[in-house]
Amino acid sequence: MKNITFINNKFVKHSNAKISIEDRGFLFADSIYELISVFDNNAIDTDQHLDRLESSLKEIKIKYKFNKNKFKKVFEKLIKVNNVINGYIYIQITRGVAERKHEFPKNYSPTTIVFTKHLNIDKKIYKNGVKIITIEDLRWLRRDIKSTSLLPNILSKQIAVEKNAFESWLIDDGVITEGSSSNAWIITNSNTIITHPANNKILKGVTRETLIKILKKNNFKIKEKPFNLIEAKNAKEAFLTSSTLSVLPVVKIDNYNISNGKPGDVTKKIINLYNDYIFKNKSSISKELKIA
Ligand code: PMP
């Protein structure tokens, strides 16, 4: 199977795509990224991801000739040549190669890479739900920037895995902010859906944004407000969202069962609504994924 990657304006064999050891992305994590899901050959919410990419570039002050249409053409080509049916597009932009000094180089040419991956997520996790643990949020205070500086995220995810959990939900000042690589949601006993407000304390997930629109359109009660661990453990249902996972039921928080340890009915409705959105006009696939 072909595996072509885009690096600094060239399409090359993935194994030939190389960057310098003096690239600031490698030395300092002086870089930002995006990940766009591909379902059934279709990139999901491309515009929203590219808008966030542009905003991350601005926030970390990388000077870049940003061209949305050019990126879209690169994505289309990679999906086609690499035959990505289900998977993702990964984009990373760094402040380029320069002598190792903390301050920005006077002149630099940013490094851009775009590659694709195939992904086959085990459907069982949607039927059974997943366990999460909670852990202190040790990240910096610009979590709204999609930076590749991800050590606290990596370390907290590793602790989850070592405890046989799927994800860590991070606690900052008594409040659950988000997961190490996903947004966190609870549903109260009065069917109000709650997720942390989109400020500097979380990454404003594209899936989160799309889901809020879908939920509002379908008359769900939704509140973007902080919630704590007690509220989470007393929740009727819980779930998480991300581009690769879409909407995934959470059935255990630390050692507390949520909705009797099974995905709840409201979460199942939400999963079906989100799947209808990503597979719009492709009803056969959307039916196959329906959760009864
Ligand atoms: N929060 C964090 C910390 C993440 O890493 C991710 C996934 N990249 C998300 C939230 C979800 O964002 P999205 O829905 O845009 O994938």
Image: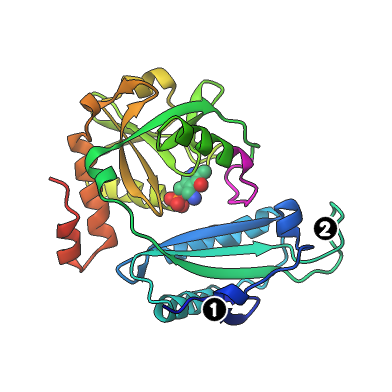
Left or right of 105 on screen, residue 174: left
| Frontmost residue, 220 versus 160 | 160
Q: Residues within 10 Å of mark 1 (few under 14, many from 20)?
A: few
Left or right of 137 on screen, residue 121: left
| Frontmost residue, 60 versus 26 | 26
Q: Residue at x 29, y 60 (%)?
A: 278
Residue 213 included in the magenta stretch of the image: no
Residue 70's label in the rendered image is 1
Span shown in magenta: 142-152
Beta carbon at label 2 within 8 Å of ligand 1: no
| Frontmost residue, 171 versus 26 | 26
**Residue behind mark 2:** 104
Residue 18's label in the rendered image is none
Q: Name the quadrant of the N terminus.
A: bottom left
Q: Disc 2 residue type?
A: Phe
Type of secondary structure dominating the magenta stretch: loop
Cα–Cα gap, marks 2 and 1 = 26 Å
Left or right of 6 on screen, residue 218: left
Sequence-earlier tag: 2 or 1: 1
Examine the rendering and report whether any part of residue 74 can be seen.
Answer: yes
